[in-house]
Image (spheres, rainbow, N blue to C red):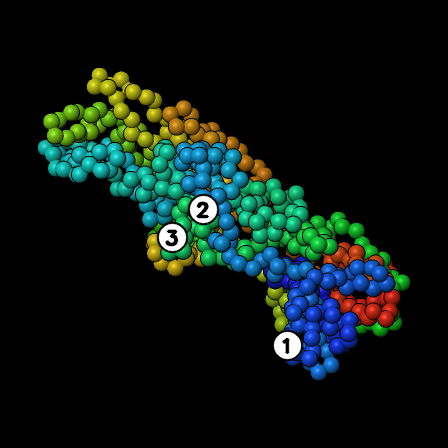
Amino acid sequence: MISLDNPMFQEDHLPTSISTTIEFPKTLRNKQEFSYIESLMELPQKKELPVSIMIAGIEIFTGILRFESVSEESLDYTFIGHNSEEFLSGFIYEIPSTPISAYPSSIQFLEDARSGRNPEVALPQLIRQTYITSMEYNRGDKYPRGHIVAPDYTHPWEPNKKGYPLGPDCSPNAKFANFLYTNAPSIIPVIRVGFLLGKIIPKVQISSQIRTYTDRLGIVAMAQCEASDPDTPTSMLPDMSNSEFVSNILRMFCATIYLDGTTYRMIPNQEVIAELPSLNWSDRISDTFSIGCDQEYTYSISYANEEDKDELREPGSIETDDTPLEIPQCESLTDLMGKIAQQEEFVPFKDPITGNIYSGKSFQARLRIVYDQFPNRRDAIFRTDTTTIPMIDIPSQAAIKSKTLGTEGRDTTEFANDITFHCIPCVPTIVAQYYDEHPDGTPKKTMIPMQSVSGIIDPKQAGGPRSKTAYIGLVFGINIIDQGNYFTQAIPDKSSGIEIRNPDYSIGITGPQGLYEKFHRHFAEWLVKKHSTLSIEIFLHPVEVAHLRLWQKIQIGNHLYFIKSIEFSISTKANIVLANADLIAL
């Protein structure tokens, strides 16, 4: 008996293992085939070998035979067909990647990763959660007894009678990973999902609708445990198995991986129920059948960080004591940063397109420097004029709100798409750099602030266990987003980047371009309806078994069904295969 379960109805959406035990009589031919010498009382020498199951000269299944035991009458082997276990074993942090030291230079690595030319790694700017409200530049405040702070943060803080600006809370490399305005950033790589999928399941054919996303998606690799190697980007990935990683991608895009002969196909479920053709088995059924009760489902989709959202904040308002405060809106990210640049204290703003609520204030940074030479030291003298730097947080990330359909009941089956990724929260940022001037005030070079959308992460301390938190986002050059707009590639000292409207891409659950609307709705609304089930005996020709694909619909009379599970009784003495199938009505 060989059983197949439709992975579309399985929790992980992955093809299940095909296996059955076969007892081979101890005939002379079988002993020769398995290199078994009974008189020596030893195990067969061939403990695993590739095989095909054939009926009437037609190959219907391929796989391997794996030795189990020797009985008095037979050699017992287990037939294992192609299954997901052959490529899903292991962990994503074990996948090899090109070492950073293997690139011609560190500058080349940075340029390729920032521009999108690197097929494995991206370097969008990231903000460490600890420093989200910290200022990384010398401020415009003047104190009678201030401090001298060199821009490279190596100069000691020294009391001075002159009025120097207040020093920064942290350095840019402490606040930001992959800081844009330097060629020596603190690096936290973002590994491309398309690269990982290609390593895990190289034979998979991915639907073009899903591939447009997987080519953009990235996983933040921020593990700093003993087993991680900063020179190998994938070794910094979180503690996640290959099977969990692939299942998460399938849950995001409401898709299933099917076995297709000796290869695999990743197909959106909505495409399966809407477009793919059917097989007519009306003349293949026997008189033995039973009609089951209506099958009922509830359907849900959620991210791991859905529970992190601020439940106290309703869309459009923030609770201040007992009085709801209406939140002003912004028309774009550029408009948001412009409005926050005018705020001296944290003020909330809402993006009506994404539903995100941001909060921000501005800082005045002193970036113009003239160096005075002293006999024993060099001190930085800052000009009095300042550059406005907005500081932005995101207290309410609208994209991660979960979605549920159907009514729970005693006989209801839960179909939960629990995505264990963290949908990365993102904010627009402006970063700058100190720039030198000649004593007469003439700038040695022009400093242009750089704009991007940066992801907010909370990396664990180095030396502890490997983090299980897996942030995922859409990468556009130096930007990483969950939804909404982003900026063109900013170039140091040349261009700050221009905001680009993004009407197509979102990995948020809700919204017109969200995952539910684009990938889940059609399938979810079909699934939560009541469906009759049919258990039936079917007689199939070996060719039909060989060409059967579990995404295909089955027509019986005037009704269409999906195969939920099917069990084949195979005999080499018959040219027809008897199957018992459990079907669910379309």
Q: Is residue 521 visible?
A: no
Between 185 and 442, the one nearer to me in the picture: 185
- Element under disc 3: loop
For badge 3, the amino acid type reads Gln
Real-space CA distance between mark 2 and mark 3, rounded to the nearest whole angstrom: 11 Å
Q: Position of residue 264 (x, y in %)?
A: 68, 52
For badge 1, the amino acid type reads Glu
Horizontal arrangement in the rendering, residue 497 relative to residue 167 (left or right) = right
Real-space CA distance between mark 1 and mark 3, rounded to the nearest whole angstrom: 49 Å
Q: Where is residue 89 in the image (x, y as percent from the top left)?
A: 56, 59
Horizontal arrangement in the rendering, residue 329 relative to residue 269 (left or right) = left
Q: Mark 3 points at which residue?
A: 224
Quarter containing the C terminus? bottom right
Between 208 and 357, the one nearer to me in the picture: 208
Question: Which quarter of the figure has residue 392?
Answer: top left
Mark closer to the observer (1, 2): 1
- Element under disc 2: helix
Q: Position of residue 164 (x, y in %)?
A: 17, 32
Q: Where is residue 58 in the image (x, y as percent from the top left)?
A: 83, 59
Horizontal arrangement in the rendering, residue 100 relative to residue 559 (left or right) = left
For badge 2, the amino acid type reads Pro
Farthest-out residue, front: 40
Question: Which quarter of the figure has residue 345?
Answer: top left
Q: Mark 2 points at which residue?
A: 233
Which residue corresponds to the image point at 51% horizontal and 51% vertical from the top-left? Answer: 95
Quarter containing the N terminus? bottom right
Which residue corresponds to the image point at 17% horizontal and 29% vertical from the top-left? Answer: 378
Q: Mark 1 points at which residue?
A: 42
- Mark 2, Cα crowd under 10 Å, few <14 / some 14-19 / many 20+, is many
